[in-house]
């Protein structure tokens, strides 16, 4: 990675994102752009004063946290999602780092959050930071659905956490499990697992994966249930998923499962888009 972008609104949530971005930039020997966006609907004088104040605070923050780092502060004016995605494209960012979404319980149930729309619009991987970083990532969990976006997530993890332990799994829903005993050793479960194993092997042969990528384990159960089980068992410090954005009319372009994770990530969350052509 050569270029890291971290967006901030000067909140405590954003401070954690800046700390993680600076750590990643140091590990990768990359440049770190620290970006904030001011609403261009504000009167010009107020907007200018606010931009100057934000810039001064960020420069002071960086001088205290990473005085020798290769950083650059930019304050943009405009709509947040448009400005950040355009900035990422213009500067060929390899990663966008963000703090947590501030929940609005009523409105969040009616529409996509800004965070969801930003993740769905981003052409580069997005890292959502939940905790203050105290070390490089050491334990990564990746649910796999045999898609190009999942392959992209594995590549990003390899760049971001080259020495981390990686666990990949595919959650397999067995049809009518309740009518067939609900066990893994029924004829239907064995047949479904065999089919999924073939799909996994075909996927791994069709996509280019980093050397040493573990073969995803086929586990029976819903993806939500298996995710909770793996999180409890392995206690990862990073969860990585491939973004599967929907086309056409859809209230949530990321899909329900991904949107839930973006809203309330259990640990730091990496979302990788489809590979750029």
Image (tube, helix red, strand yellow):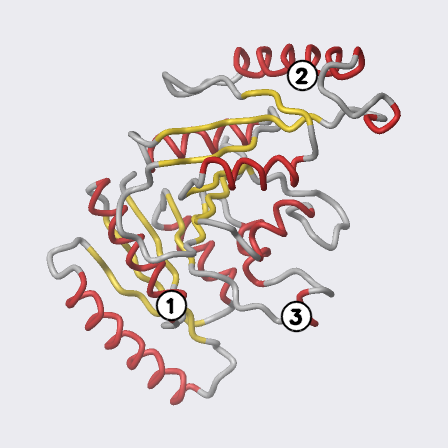
Is 44 rendered above or below residue 135?
below
Q: Which mark is residue 196?
A: 2
Residue nearest the viewer, comparing 164 with 252: 164
Q: Nearer the viewer, mark 1 or mark 3?
A: 3
Can you see residue 136?
yes
The residue singled out by tag 3 in the image is 105
Q: What residue is rendered at 48% in x and 84% in y?
A: 42
Is 138 rendered above or below residue 131?
above
Earlier along the polypeptide chain: callout 1 or callout 3? 1
Q: Judging from the image, what secondary structure is the residue with disc 3 in?
A: helix
Q: Nearer the viewer, mark 2 or mark 1?
A: 2
Residue 211 left/right relative to 103? left
Q: Position of residue 194 (x, y in %)?
A: 69, 10
Q: What residue is rendered at 38% in x and 56% in y?
A: 131
Q: Residue 99's quadrant in the figure? A: bottom left
The residue singled out by tag 1 in the image is 36
Q: Position of residue 160 (x, y in %)?
A: 33, 37
Q: Judging from the image, what secondary structure is the residue with disc 2 in?
A: helix
Q: Position of residue 87 (x, y in %)?
A: 40, 56
């Amino acid at each position: 990675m050569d270029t890291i972008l971290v967006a901030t609104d000067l909140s405590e949530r954003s401070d954690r994102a800046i700390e993680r971005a600076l750590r990643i930039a140091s590990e990768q020997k990359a440049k770190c752009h620290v970006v904030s966006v001011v609403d261009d609907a504000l009167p010009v004088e107020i907007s200018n004063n606010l931009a100057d104040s934000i810039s001064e605070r960020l420069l002071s923050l960086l001088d205290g946290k990473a005085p020798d780092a290769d950083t650059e502060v930019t304050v943009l004016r405009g709509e947040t999602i448009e400005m950040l995605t355009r900035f990422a494209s213009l500067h060929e960012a390899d990663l966008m780092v963000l703090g947590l979404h501030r929940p609005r319980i009523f409105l969040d149930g009616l529409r996509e959050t800004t965070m969801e729309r930003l993740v769905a619009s981003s052409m580069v991987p997005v890292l959502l930071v939940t905790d203050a970083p105290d070390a490089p990532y050491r334990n990564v969990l990746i649910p796999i659905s045999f898609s190009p976006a999942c392959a992209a997530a594995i590549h990003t993890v390899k760049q971001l956490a080259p020495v981390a332990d990686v666990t990949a799994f595919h959650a397999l829903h067995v049809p009518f499990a309740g009518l067939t005993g609900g066990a893994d050793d029924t004829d239907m479960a064995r047949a479904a697992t065999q089919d999924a194993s073939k799909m996994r092997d075909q996927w791994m042969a069709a996509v280019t994966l980093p050397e040493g990528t573990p073969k995803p384990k086929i586990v029976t159960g819903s993806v939500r249930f298996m995710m909770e089980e793996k999180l409890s068992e392995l206690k990862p410090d990073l969860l990585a998923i491939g973004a599967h954005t929907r086309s056409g009319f859809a209230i949530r372009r990321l899909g329900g499962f991904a949107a839930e994770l973006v809203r309330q990530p259990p640990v730091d969350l990496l979302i990788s888009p489809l590979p750029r052509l």
